[in-house]
Amino acid sequence: MDAHLRDLRYFVAVAEELSFTRAAADRLFISQPALSKQIRRLELEFHTPLFVRDRRTVALTPAGSALLPHARRLIEEWKQARRAVAEAASAQEAVLTVGFQTSIGRGLIPAVTATMGRLLPGRRLRFRQVSWTDPTAGLANGDVDVAVAWLPVPDDGFSWKVITREDRWVALPAGHRLAALDVVPFAELADEPFIALPPEARALRDFWLADDHRDVPARVAAVAETADETFEAVASGLGVVLLAAGNAEIYRRDDLVYRPVSGLSPSELAVAWRTGDDREAVRVFAEACCLCTDAATATG
Amino acid sequence: MDAHLRDLRYFVAVAEELSFTRAAADRLFISQPALSKQIRRLELEFHTPLFVRDRRTVALTPAGSALLPHARRLIEEWKQARRAVAEAASAQEAVLTVGFQTSIGRGLIPAVTATMGRLLPGRRLRFRQVSWTDPTAGLANGDVDVAVAWLPVPDDGFSWKVITREDRWVALPAGHRLAALDVVPFAELADEPFIALPPEARALRDFWLADDHRDVPARVAAVAETADETFEAVASGLGVVLLAAGNAEIYRRDDLVYRPVSGLSPSELAVAWRTGDDREAVRVFAEACCLCTDAATATG
DNA sequence: TGTTGTCATAACCTTCGGCTATGGACGCCC
DNA sequence: GGGCGTCCATAGCCGAAGGTTATGACAACA
């Protein structure tokens, strides 16, 4: 009788890609049979085909074309609903939810908390760790009000200010041949197997694989969903991974060594929000982040 | 990440009833724990409560109030999407889908098919049996374009024309004490256990229980979802059931007897469509239904 | 003609969504 | 004031839904 909104996302993806294989792999990150099955379910529910598959091509039927705009509207409306709820909740509870993917550290949290307490007394901060599959750190689906995230953040609908710029280092297992070097040239590293972010992270995954400093794509030894998974994989010799200089300090481990990498552009940590979200708390939080790093730079 | 539209229906029901028990039993026809669980899931997904339950009352939180209009819009948009797809499909395939719950019979189908073939050549009819839980015979959710249904049909958004008016009869197990009578006064029947339509059928269920001819509610011995279920239940002695005179003929069985019931208003078979659905095929079908019965009345 | 790319099918496993049964808190009523 | 009914929550269970990998059929193409 009524459908899952996920199925409508699936439908829109196939309608736009006009290919089950590509929609499944490149956009939805599920297997192609799963996608075929779900679309078939949808077609059964409507008692009419939405696509014609003639062995080599996929095309919308009139029924599919009729559904497409409605499906887009439903997805958009749902996105708005999520945001409306999140904003109402945070207004009510006087809480600003801050998304992050890896430990923030760098003295940022106490400093920002203090600054916020001064500028906006009575408003609390809540930090929520979000999935590595979401490069917007929870902004996109309304899970968080503001995020502290490594660039790149998708630029459609999001704004940010860089908090700090740090060189990229590499995490190596303790006995690795390159651990002998004080500084590792990226050229030495390029052919190593890497531990990668999930493909859903898209540009962010590419950044930490240093894709734009390569001719051939990186060898991905494994995908990790958390920091611990990543470092366990590195410690076990599965591969190596790039990380920000500051994070090498935070995630210190006995079985790993961290080395600066030369020949790479630096990484940038930013505070990000949804473009057009002009709530005072959001603005003030972003300012506080920048204030704090300015102060840190000044004093440190 | 994204929700089932069903969960939004559940949410709206609770928000409007402000009671889990009532929303579950009276509107959604699921158990109260199932509803509680789903709402809780929704709240977990939003990371915020949507209702405050203080032991005796249920109220919306600000987050819940923010969600409510979006949820209503999503449900409405989905309904439109279903209809758009159904209309596109039937236009494309040149098929008009006719919903029905019990065998139509009465010579209607061949007569209407012939008339439609004359008035609208090239357009085919497809008959689809729909669930007894839906008193609109599939009109509401867009499953069908036009329905042949017993009144009452909900009057919010639906229009109909009566095709035929028939006395109500009763189906009794062969050896039943009332089978001895040629005509059964409803007063004799009122205290018998009845086989009922599902509660979701609402007014239609009430009609076939003859609720408006009773002082106390009918004793419901069982709920049946299909005609066969119904007559099996009657044959097994579980209870009795009312049906239209014409259906007594269609569903003739050796282990059942059918008797006219006195003291009841007659039943009405109607052709129904969505108000405002002004497609030619819909209009012509409705006219054809009436033409055919006029002719039948004239000749029979 | 073998290879590649695409969608469908099959077998399997986990999670979800429903049910019944039960429990605890509160208002009500004798 | 002690049962009683009402309401929401919890627990345990079960079938269906939704995902996975492995495999198959067929067209396009080198």
Image (cartoon, coloured by chain):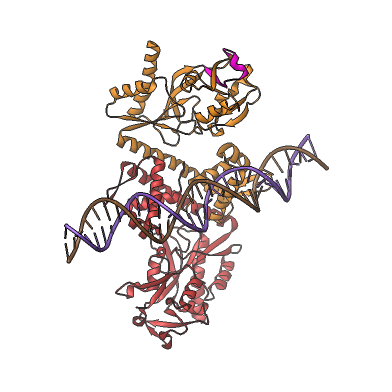
Chain colours: A orange, B red, C brown, D purple
Picture residue at 40% right of the left edge, 77% below the top = B266
Residue D1, image x and y in percent? Answer: 16, 57
Picture residue at 67% right of the left edge, 48% below the top = A54
Picture residue at 50% right of the left edge, 70% below the top = B289
Please say if B14 is above or below B45.
below
Task: Assess whether residue B51 is covered by the magenta stretch.
Answer: no
Picture residue at 48% right of the left edge, 23% below the top = A251
Task: Assess whether residue A170 is covered by the magenta stretch.
Answer: yes
Residue A43, image x and y in percent? Answer: 56, 52
Please say if B58 is above or below B108.
above
Of B92 and A56, the residue lying toward us:
A56
Can residue B146 be seen here? The reply is: yes
Please say if A90 is above or below B96.
above
Residue C11, image x and y in percent? Answer: 64, 52
Q: Which residues are magenta?
A: A167-183
Question: Is A245 left, or right, of A98 in this rendering?
Answer: right
Residue A17, image x and y in percent? Answer: 60, 40
Of A266 and A74, the residue lying toward us:
A266
Can residue B18 be seen here? The reply is: no
* Quarter that holds the C terminus of chain A: top left
Q: How many marks?
A: 0
Question: Is B282 left, or right, of B193 in this rendering?
Answer: right
For residue B188, which quarter of the picture?
bottom left
